[in-house]
Image (spheres, rainbow, N blue to C red):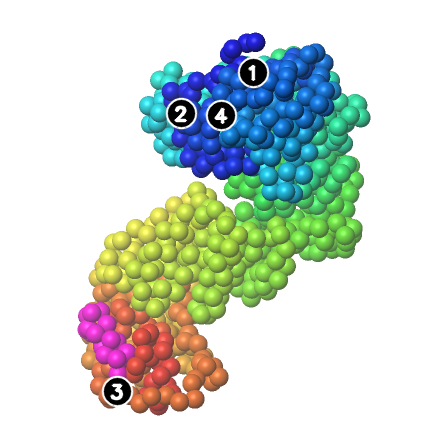
Amino acid sequence: MLTARFTAPAVPKLLVHRPGLLERLSAGVQGPLTLINGPAGSGKTVLTAQWAAGRRAPGAPVWLTVEPDDAPGAFWAYVLEALHRGGVELPAAVGRPTRAEGVTRSFLVRLAEGLAAAPRPAVLVLDQFDTARPPSATTGMTEGLDFVLRHSSGGLRVVLTSRTDSLLPLHRYRAAGEITEIRQADLRFTPGDAGALLDEHRLRISPEGVRLLMDRTEGWAAGVRLCALAMQRSPDPEAFLRQFAADRTTIADYLLSEVLDTQPASTQDLLLRVCVTDRVHPGLADALTGRDDGARTLAGLARDNAFLERVEASDWYRLHPLFAEVLRAHLRQRRPGLEPLLHRRAARWLAGTGRLTEAVVQAAAAADWPFAAARLVEGLALGRLLTGLEAEPLGRALAALPAEPDGRATALVGAVCRIAAGDPAGCEARLRRADACRDTASPAAALGRAFVGVLAGRLAGDVAAAGRAAADAERLFREVPPDLLAERPELRALLLAALGAAELGAGRLDRAGTALTAAVAACGAPGTESALCDALGSLAMTELLGGRPAEAAGHARASLAAAERYALPPESRSALAHLVLAGVAVEEGELSAARAALGPAATAAGPRPERVALVAAAVIGARIAAAEGDGEGALRALHAVRPGAGPRYAWEADELALAESAAHLACGDPAAALRALDPVPAGGPRHALARAHAHLAAGRPGPAARELAGLPGEDSLPAPLRTRTHLLRARITAAGGDPGEHEGPGGPGRADLPGVPGPAGLPGVPGGERRPEAVPAVRPAVVEALTARETEVLAMAAHLLSTEEIAAGLYVSANTVKTHLKSIYRKLGVTRRSDAVHRAQDLGLL
């Protein structure tokens, strides 16, 4: 008898205390069977030894380590000796096994009766129970153990540690509620466990470092311990985690010796071949090995906890990431040159079973770019490089795509990759290569070229090119298989969103609205999430530029809500949505809210924002600064967008010139304000108002009046422009000019209007008409009558003038206006500006 087999292993000095698992073990031995099942190094033996040392069992546990060469008779002889050494007294009539090959049924009967008659239950730990070989011997042991457990009347409690499910009829014990199971998922270290172990090793690792360690090891106890030991020897433990390579550590030796080398040669060959994929199917395993034993071998490895597990509710399996990494390194060493061939085989099997993304990833790993690109182009899957859950893995796989692609499909894929990177020149170069191919393009390839053309037109700011490509795409949509097109909803959604954004960038708002509305309607299916957020953001800016702030804000909020719902990262959210909310906040006089929205807008825009976002951000930032009286800050915001080619469309020049004119007025320089407007052709009401403001600020009411004389009928003006016109005419009258008849709120005018934003920036927004059905049937009485000044403030608020604009028009401070508004809210029994306006309209006060 080997004495060491009866002694529990010493508990490590550096130990993670896991009270929850220890309590489950103590509860488990109240019944007949406790199974601790997990792969090598998962902590089965350490946990059980810790539990045994703590004497948490009904009696002192009896320990026996099972050896691989134990025959059934030898096994039962060791069991009897373990019970004897543990103080379990059995009748002499039980006897002892007489031969190594097995025991008789009568011996098992006597043993069960002896255990049943014992004064207290015996708790037997059988460590490494799965190691007995051959299987026939194990079967004899488990059948006998099952018999004794069931017939000892609770006199025997067994704790098994095993890498595999034992041959005991576990289903019977489960049905009877007589088994406690602690499995791999329970044994995995939590981040808290890993952090505690690192603390025990006197390693101070950041939470990010602990998360990285958990990602690499997936909570494998031995992996965490071995990493901790290696980190102790490293001068920079955090850097070790970032640069950690499993194949160059003791983890590789452990996995090779404890897992790979214990398998038959054919199983080792299968493991080395299937490690090139993230997950493996029996059919894929057969394709990689050239054999037909994939299903049987994979199921056996999973059953044996050989660092391979079945993906839940499927026929697929996955290797532990560390084991896969070690296997790949071992494959390169033992079979150099085989890995690319295996990747090619995997790519073709996956493509043949319709797993496009995985096929592309495998082909890219083999640098088989023509095959990878052809799958994307002919599968109408170019849009998947830009949106959906597959965009990230595809982007990583195609990162090494050659700068000078060979073939039409490879060039088109390269062009989309450059679009994702915001590189218009690189995109154009690859499109030229695609167009230079002389072979006849398939309908899918032709549609792919048109699709990329629309996106490239948007990226380059070329609305004409985008429009031509969109027209080609519309024709080609009818030439590709409808069922395939139905599987790619992101294609049409992305195309329409890009076309609408290009039209928006050119200032063609009606056409932009049509395309973007169609883009939103095309979204909804999985994979269209990014397109939906993008289209809603562009549609919001289209509405804001068109003077419809309520609709703009609604679309902007819908864009951001969708991004939140789909958990899109900040850089994938619409910068325009944030900018629109900032622009609307400026119109409402909520300058702090406007500034708060500009920060997320910059984050979402990224390092290469689109031109419309650049211009809008500059104009809105300038409007905020001017409203705060910081003319110099307003000019700095505008000049940030000036360098380079300058405005490419008329609307950009208009917006920047109007904003710059207002900024100069805020600086008290009306001459510069007029000069800022000179390069822009006059003609719109906003230009006339801006010039009138500048003339009046320069003390020239006559020219200011003449600027207003050419305005169209006031009924045709948006409400904010109409109100500003009334205010300006009142000031001209007070300054001695002759603006003609005017109506609306006025006041004693003055020629000097520094800091008044006036008509600058994004167009003024009209007040929305109230819907009669939204008015309650009964309204409570007014608390007290409004003063004349409060009525005047409320009238201006009804035209959506900001707090600062009302203050400028009445020649009072912004704080005074806020005081009036608070009084209005109290008297009308409301809490918001819009509700106050609606209430006053209902009561006939406006």
**Residue displayed at 74% across by 45% down:** 444
Indicate which disc, 3 or 1, sits on the residue closer to the N terminus. Answer: 1
Please state which amino acid type lies under the numbered disc 3.
Val
Of the two numbered discs 1 and 2 on the same chain, state the one appearing first in sequence: 2
Task: Report the residue marked by disc 4.
Answer: 61
For mark 3, give the secondary structure.
Answer: loop
Q: Any mark on residue 15, and which?
A: 2
- In this view, the residue in front, 166 or 453, is 166
Query: Residue sitting at 36 percent across and 76 percent down?
Result: 834
The residues colored magenta run 809-827
Residue named by callout 1: 81
Q: Given this view, does label 1 or label 2 mark the residue nearer the observer?
A: 1
What amino acid type is highlighted by mark number 4? Pro
- For the point 54% across and 47% down, the residue is 459
Let me know if residue 570 is in the magenta part: no
Per the model, the C-alpha gap separating discs 3 and 4 is: 83 Å
Of the numbered discs 4 and 2, the one sitting upstream in the chain is 2
Q: Residue 324: where, in percent of width, then height? A: 60, 24
Q: CA distance from mark 3 to mark 2?
A: 72 Å
| Along the viewing direction, whichever of 103 and 846 lies nearer the viewer | 103
Labels 4, 2: front one: 4
User: Which residue was labeled with disc 3?
Assistant: 783
Find numbered disc 4 in the image and state the secondary structure of the residue it sits on.
loop
What is the crowding at mark 1: few (fewer than 14 residues within 10 Å), some, or many (at least 20)? some
Provide the secondary structure element on which disc 1 rests. helix
Q: Are marks 4 and 2 in contact (CB under 8 Å)?
A: no
Answer with left or right where residue 664 lies relative to residue 34: left
Residue 97: x and y in percent read 66, 15
Residue in the image at 52% along x and 34% along y: 29
Q: Give the mark toward the camera: 3 or 4.
A: 4
Residue 409 falls left or right of residue 754? right
